[in-house]
Every structure is written in C-alpha cells, then in structure tokens.
Amino acid sequence: MNGLRLFVYLLFMPGILLAQDQDFGTWLSAEVNHKITSRWQLSLAGQVRLNRNLETVDLCFTQIGAQFTVARNFKAAVNYRLIQKNELDYWSTRHGFFADLAWKKKWKPISLTVRGRLQGRVEDQFIEENGFSPNWFFRTKFSLSYDTERRWTPFVSQETFLLLRSSEEPYRNGDVTRFRYEAGIEYEIDRRNSLSVSYMLQHNRSPIVNEFIVSAGYSFSF
C-alpha cells in the first residue's frame, strides 16, 4: 500500500468502521519488572484475552523480555512470547518475538512516545513442516500521556500493523492489516504497584471486524 492509498484509507476510515462486523472483548494482564541497573530492566508478563462478546477465551500468553536505555529519550527492547491460541476446535501454539525502539519526549504536562516494533510470529506447524517460517510485521505506535501531577495519568494511542511477509498469504505482503485506537488511565498505587484500564477500538482488515476491547492491567516493579 503506497502513501496515497494509506492517506485515503485513514481519511475515510470513520465511515468505513460503521459498516463492518463487530465484536466485544476484554484483555486482562499482569507484569513484573525488575530494574537491574540504571539502563537495564527485565520483565515477565502474562495476558488472557476474551472475545466473541466475552463467551470465548481467544488466547493467553506468557512473555519475557529485556529493555535497555540506549541514550537520552531512546529505549530498545527485545521480547519473546509463548502464545496459546483458541482455534475453536483445538488450541494452537504460537511463538512471538519482538524488537522495539522507542523515543520519548516531554513537554510538560504532555509526553509523546513513538515506538517502532519489528515482530515475528510463527506457529509450531511452520517450524516442523517448512522450517523456521515466521510472519513478519512492522508496527508503529504513537502515544500521548498527560501528567496530572497526581497518581492518575490519562493517555491515548494509535498503532498500525504493516505486514512485511506472510508464510500463509504472501499476496498480502505490504498490506496494512490492523489499526488500534486506545484511551485509558494509569493509576500509581505506590512506587512499586500500578493499575491501568483502557478502552480500545481494534480494526482488523482480514477478515474485516471491529473489536471493542476493555483492558485492565496490573504492574509490579522492583
């Protein structure tokens, strides 16, 4: 998809969204972060996702990762994710791996974060039958947060998924496959514990489905 097609799609997307199939779901997550040095941090996270109007567990995953402060305003991260995906008549195992580079700038009380993520995802069947043959995505995310100087921090974000390479559907290479729009609030309980709640619109393009998702998360840092 070239730049002009993407611009036109974004321009008319609000009208397009009203005409598509819809679903409601919820994502529940928890994570633990450990700061090793002033630059290095390790993390362990888990999440359960429900869809089909909360009637089905869509997937659950466990993720481990490391984050490194490259320079002022720049952070890099690598993560591995073990995923159990509900295919309705069976559960499949997927493996996800990510490489992130994020830039953050503060103009008090506003903070802007721009993140690029190279994502690989592979199912066990592609490892066994066709060798290591993952699907590759590049994801861009823009986030704005507002510092209330209290424990509450509201935020909004937008994320775009670009399919770089597909093992199953190579004709879709180069397509934008998904958009996410999210608004929420983070609440700092104390220096180690925090909670977050958000509401997300996820627009999937194949098949075309709009998902309205309520998320809740807990984070512990030490």
Image (tube, grey):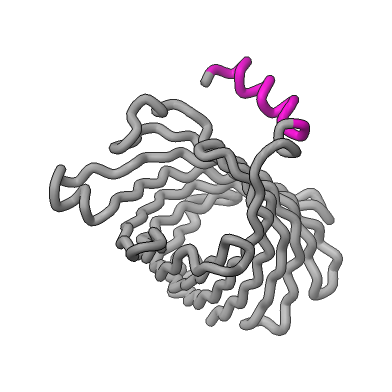
Q: Is residue 8 visible?
A: yes
Left or right, 70 with respect to 208, comes to: left
Q: Position of residue 41 (x, y in %)?
A: 46, 68
* Residue 62 to residue 180: above or below: below
Query: In the image, 16: left or right of 39?
Result: right
| Residues shaded magenta | 2-15
- Taking the spot 15% from the left edge, 43% from the top edge, the residue there is 130
Residue at the extreme front: 89
Asked if residue 216 lies in the magenta stretch, the reply is no
In this view, 115 is above or below 166: below
Q: Is residue 13 magenta?
A: yes
Q: Quadrant of residue 150?
A: bottom right
The answer to whether residue 180 is visible is no
The part of the image, by quadrant, that contains residue 135 is top left
Q: 214 or 206, which is in the foreground?
A: 206
Residue sitting nearer the eye, 155 or 36:
155
> On the picture, is 181 further left or further right than 88?
right
Residue at image x 14%, y 52%? 128
The location of residue 40, given as percent across then percent down, is 44, 66
Location of residue 114 in the rendering, given as x and y in whole percent from the top left corner? 61, 44
Residue 116, x across and y down, in percent:
51, 42
Q: Which SS type dominates the magenta stretch?
A: helix
Q: How many labels sit on residues?
A: 0
